Amino acid sequence: MELELILAVEEAIPPDHPAAILAVPLGILVFVGSIYLLLWSNYGAKKALAITGVAWAGFSAIIGVFWWFGAPGIPPGLGISHLPGQSSDHYVDDWHAFEEGSERARFFPSIADIDEFGEPHEYLGLPPQEGAERPDLEWSSLMSLAGEAEMDMQNQFLPIDENGIAQIGAERRAAFEEDAAANEPEEAVGRAPTFYTAEAISEVKLLDDAETGVMLATAEFQAYANFVDEDQVPLEPVPVGEPVHWFAFYDPGMVWVPSAIWTGISLFIFLISLAWLDRMEMREKRLQSDEVEEPERLAVPIAQ
């Protein structure tokens, strides 16, 4: 009996699909609507709506505060990660790569002096941590962040599609082909499936931009041509093109925004519902008071 493995892909449904946009509103409608119907049968439509608004919005506002600021042992940003119609990583932190001379480079004048950049331990003002028995936790976290920057810069330096084909311009490809042909190994009998690859030939270095205060990263990258021998064993990659410095700036993200929006809307609904409920309660009390104060009409016998 053959079993098929079904994998759940996070982006199987696009964020702009109607199902993705309506999922949260419909869930709230079903959950809150059932409670509202029960209250309606006891208090009437208007008062049931006010009670439901106070209860649900108050609870949502409290939950939103925990999502927004976190709690003891719970870091912030673990609640709503995005709004309907947005991708799941819309507000998360990310690196954005750029090359010298690009439009983005104009916003970061500090990239002009590469010598000012330092390795992660130098950026933190620490001694080298590679051989330390217990490396600094902040350094370890920064090293992971620097690795993400390197990957982002490399993907922009030499973008490669799912078929292993480098997505580069005709002029750059022609220069790579010329270098690959000139330096092709004698034992090469063909090209590797992914012919052009790239890797960083320097450590990622970091610097806070002097004008914007944004964290910048830089590394030097080299492109390679890859050949195989008659046994289809990869040979030593051949450098093509010149080494190039790439840069990236760090966007810390705003994971708190969806939770803040949720909390603000919930608090607004709570206050409106509370005022409406108070108004109806006061009106009912006035009506009850008027009924008590109204003098009793005594029956007067009719003269015979």
Image: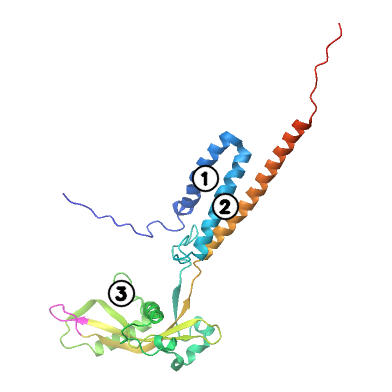
First in sequence: mark 1 or mark 2? Answer: 1
Camera-near label (1 vs 2) is 2
Amino acid at circle 3: Ile
Using residue 4 as the reference point, say whether residue 106 is left or right of it: right
Magenta segment boundaries in residue numbering: 227-235
Could you say where residue 284 lies in the image, as x and y percent from the top left?
A: 70, 37
Amino acid at circle 2: Gly
Q: What quarter of the picture does the C terminus occupy?
A: top right
Q: Residue furthest top?
A: 304
SS assignment at label 1: helix
Look at the picture and state if 163 lies above or below 57.
below
- Contact? badges 3 and 1 (CB < 8 Å): no
- Which circle marks residue 32 in the picture? 1
Q: Distance of mark 3 from mark 1, alpha carbons?
A: 52 Å
Using residue 6 as the reference point, say whether residue 25 is left or right of it: right
**Residue drawn where x is 47% and y is 57% of the image:** 16
* Foreground residue among 189 and 211: 211
Mark 2, other Cα within 10 Å: few <14 / some 14–19 / many ≥20:
many
Q: Distance of mark 2 from mark 3, alpha carbons?
A: 54 Å
Mark 1, other Cα within 10 Å: few <14 / some 14–19 / many ≥20:
some
**Residue drawn where x is 53% and y is 37% of the image:** 38
- Which circle marks residue 58 in the picture? 2
Residue 280 among magenta residues: no
- Which circle marks residue 165 in the picture? 3
